[in-house]
Image (cartoon, rainbow, N blue to C red):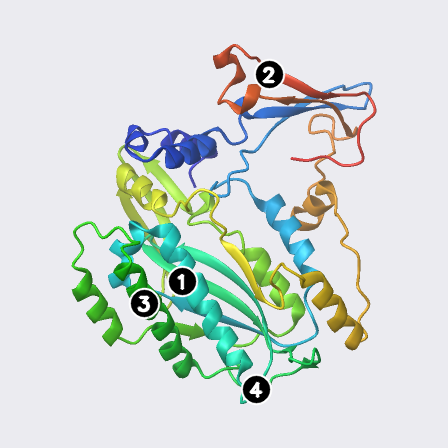
Amino acid sequence: MSSIAEIQQLFSHPVIKTFNLYSQKVFKDISSCHTESRGKHVYKCDNKACGHIHYQYHSCGNRHCLFCGSSKRDDWVEKLVVDLLPTSYYHVVFTLPHELNSLIMGNRKALFTLLFDSAKDTLLTFGKDEKYLGGMIGITSVLHTWGQELTFHPHVHCIVSGGGIADTGKWIEPKRKGETFLFPVQAMKIVYRSIFMKRLRKMIKLNKLKQNEIDISNVLKVVADKTWNVYAKSPFKDVSSVVEYLGRYSHKIAISHHRIKSIIDSHISFDYKDYQDSHKKKVLIVSKEEFIRRVEQHILPKRFVKIRHYGYLQNHGKRKRIDEIKLQLKIKSLPIIKVPMEIKMMERFQMDILKCRKCEIGRYQLMEIWRAGQGSESGKENGLGDIKIYSNKAPPQSIVL
């Protein structure tokens, strides 16, 4: 596996200057993640015979980063857990035909939003149908844009509640039980395609999309005549399985640094699962320029929301709806408990991050926090220098890495 330093150096490649300014910023953040230019926490061992000074450099915090993001993910999952109810949960994936890729690439924000809305309205439509439920379901949707080989493959993963809220406000359970999915998948494919295509044609008619040199009439004909892919997986076993899934996939990125095997001369190799060949793990070798191009096409538009909630989980009035349902079901609401980072690391990796790495006896105490000047790559470059934002001999209760 390639070192973090090698991968970060890769993302300083000259080809990046050909991308838009936002993509350039993303790569700049990744290449400086956990380096001194991001700022640092300064720790000192409390063992007087040791006194070792340890520097923990800050992460970049960019949502596309290959190296950081687990802390944000854990915080998000902790908040979501309190909204999960004792009902069945289902997983369904809505995919767009590859013939639309060229059009999507030029209109990512508009057509990603259309994908979200079409999937959501398909599910809500079936949820309201008395044959299946007759109420408002809860949906959490997550956008992914990649395939295993980093190809462009936009799709939305949806976690759907089996139960829902009737118009009367009463909690109701699904009528189709023991099925792969609570709604008929073949029927969903037709409705999903119909909703997306109707709105897409309207956007094209109103000239709201960049078409470049795309033969749009031919593209529309091809995708309208084919069967669209809606893939329903088996229901989750229990609520803990839902939490485990969301923990793994909600903040997933196109490729993690663990998958990058080697960076040699002008080429890079990374592993992938070949779903067409019994999910066998294989290795793909591409040029550095091609690898960076593939990664760049998965950088989402600035401030684009990739995780969305619908139905009874939509933000407006959500807390009131959830509390009313829990009252009906006689479920006690539990407070959100913030778990310190050192405990999370101990549980996940059996690693005591406060234990001195030199003497292995003392405990690290936080002494100072330094932030790079005004968020530049290096405060020194702008003559600003690093800024001390915390200095105290009395350490706080937990540390942030």
Q: Nearer the viewer, residue 251 or 363?
A: 251
Q: Which residue is mark 4?
A: 178
Q: Is residue 242 above or below residue 188?
A: above
Q: Nearer the viewer, residue 166 or 344?
A: 166
Nearer-N-terminus badge (3/4): 4
Going by the numbered disc 3, the residue's amino acid type is: Gln
For the C terminus, give its image quadrant: top right
Of tags 4 and 1, which is closer to the observer? 1
**Residue 236, image x, y percentages:** 58, 73
Label 2: which secondary element: loop
Q: Which residue is mark 1?
A: 115
* Residue appearing at x 53%, y 89% in the figure: 131
Label 3: which secondary element: loop
**Residue 185, image x, y percentages:** 43, 80
**Residue 399, image x, y percentages:** 72, 34
Disc sitting over residue 276 in the figure: 3
Nearer-N-terminus badge (2/1): 1
